[in-house]
Image (spheres, rainbow, N blue to C red):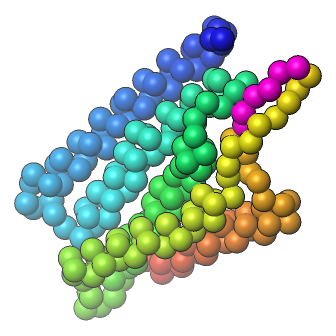
Amino acid sequence: MATLLTSTQKAFIAATSTWLVVSFAANVCIIVVIMRMKKMRTVTNMFLGNLALTDIILIAFAIPLQLHDVTHSNNYYESSTECRVVMSLPLLCITCSIYTMVALAEERYRAIVLQPPRLMTTRVAMTTLFFSWCAALVVCLTTFLQYNTRTAQHGNVTFNLCTNVMPYAFRLTHGVVVLCVSYIIPQVSCICNYCVQT
C-alpha cells in the first residue's frame, strides 16, 4: 500500500532535491575545471577535487537513499546490503573529506610556513589521497557490519526496519572511537597547522 506524503514532506523533498541538484552540478564543475585546465592541476587543487568527489558520492548515492527512508519510514523495502550502504556511505565520504582537509592543511603549512618551502609533490598527494580513502574505508567498515534489516511487529502489522543490530556497549564504544578518529584527532591536527600559519 502506497504511503501518501504530507505537504511538509513534499516541501522538504522539493527543497532537498533542489539543493542536491545544485550541489551536484557545482562539484562536477570543480572536477571538470581541474581536469581540463592544465594550470589548475596543482597539489592543492587535487585535494579540492577529492573533496568535490566525496561530495558527489554523498549527493548522488547516500542522501537520496536517506531522503527516501525519512519520507517512507513506516517500512523498509530495500535489501540488507542497501541498509548497510545507506548507513555507512555518509561516514565514508565525511571521514575521507576530513582526512583530505587535514592533508590540505599540511600541504598549505609546507608551502606557506616552512622556509624554504617544502612543496608536496603530485605523487605524494596521490598517495595521501589513496591512504585517506583506505583509512576512511576502515573507519566505516564497522558501521557497515553493524547494520542490518529486521522484521518488527506492531499490533497486527509486520514491517521491516534498517537498524543497528549490535549491543548498546558496542555501539557506544564504536561511536566514541569514530568521534575521535574521524573528527577530534583530525580537527586538532588542522588547528595545529593553521595556528602555526597565522
The residue located at (85%, 60%) in the rendering is 168
**Quadrant where the N terminus is found in the figure:** top right
Query: Where 37 sits versus 124, above or below?
Result: above
Q: Nearer the viewer, residue 198 or 71?
A: 71
Work out which residue is located at the far right of the displayed protein and give it. 155
Q: Residue 149 in the image: x percent, y percent?
A: 69, 43
The residue located at (9%, 54%) in the rendering is 37
- Residue 184 visible in this rendered orientation of the protein: no
Q: Image quadrant of residue 120?
A: bottom left
Left or right: 54 in relation to 49: right
Left or right: 87 in relation to 130: right
Q: Nearer the viewer, residue 195 or 24?
A: 24
Q: Residue 155 in the image: x percent, y percent?
A: 92, 22
Work out which residue is located at the far bottom of the displayed protein and give it. 116
Magenta-highlighted residues: 156-161
The residue located at (75%, 28%) in the rendering is 159
The residue located at (76%, 53%) in the rendering is 165
- Residue 30 visible in this rendered orientation of the protein: yes
Q: Is residue 103 magenta?
A: no
Left or right: 38 in relation to 126: left
Query: Where 159 sits versus 95, above or below?
Result: above
Q: Main secondary structure of the magenta part?
A: strand
Q: Nearer the viewer, residue 55 or 171?
A: 171
Query: Where 65 sits versus 176, above or below?
Result: above
Q: Image quadrant of residue 109?
A: bottom left
Left or right: 182 in relation to 64: right
Q: Residue 27 in the image: x percent, y percent?
A: 31, 44
Q: Residue 115 in the image: x percent, y percent?
A: 29, 90
**Count of numbered circles on the image:** 0
